[in-house]
Image: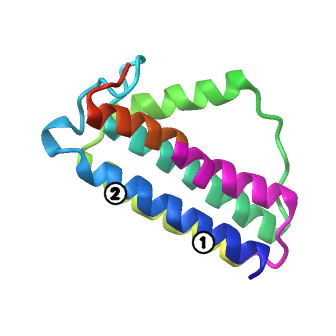
Amino acid sequence: MTDAQRLLSEEDAAWRALCELFARVSDDRFEEPTLTPDGWSPKDAMFHVAGWMADCGLQLERMRAGSFEEEEETRESIERQNRAWFEVSRAMAPADVRAEFAAARQRMVSAFGTLAEITPGAVEWFEESGALHYAKHERDLRAFLEGTAP
């Protein structure tokens, strides 16, 4: 198994686990702002994950095209982006968030799978926006579903 195949397999397993947790959130709790201390709902978290997957897909497509320019991300720039996506998600219909979630994941996985060369930068984008990121939100969702969210 190549590194790319291994990474795709790990992402797929993590994706399935995350989707199983989101599927356990009832429709009447999907927009309940108690997932995090900052007032995120499961819907907000889903759109947040979708946003990073979509950005990852774009960056991977740029890598494939040879037009990728690495930008220095800071904690502040990441938090600023997270806040922007939070504001957008608040106004979105749940069905639209779910559609974006699925489409963003497809774009990310497709872009990764078509890279001619799997560079360290591609691996970092794919893992950080995929399996590693999903795991953080899995913990939040488990606590939410168990009634132990902060």
Residue at 60 percent across and 72 percent down: it is 9
The residue carrying mark 2 is 20
Which amino acid does the dot numbered 2 rest on? Answer: Glu
Q: Give the residues in magenta.
A: 115-135
Position of residue 80 in the picture relative to residue 75 (left or right) = left
Which amino acid does the dot numbered 1 rest on? Answer: Ser
The residue carrying mark 1 is 9
> Which of 89/129 is in front?
129
Which quadrant of the rendered structure holds the N terminus? bottom right
* Vertical order, 13 against 74 (above or below): below
User: Within the magenta stretch, is there residue 117?
Assistant: yes
Q: Secondary structure at mark 1?
A: helix
Q: Earlier in the sequence, mark 1 or mark 2?
A: 1
**Which colour scheme appears in the figure?**
rainbow
Position of residue 129 in the picture relative to residue 73 (left or right) = left
Position of residue 36 in the picture relative to residue 123 (left or right) = left
> Which of 55/28 is in front?
28
Q: Position of residue 112 (x, y in %)?
A: 68, 69
Residue positioned most to the left: 28
Q: Position of residue 48 (x, y in %)?
A: 47, 40
Residue at 82 percent across and 70 percent down: it is 118
Residue at 56 percent across and 53 percent down: it is 53
Residue at 82 percent across and 40 percent down: it is 71
> Could you tell me if the residues under marks 1 and 2 are in contact, i.e. CB atoms within 8 Å?
no
Q: Secondary structure at mark 2?
A: helix
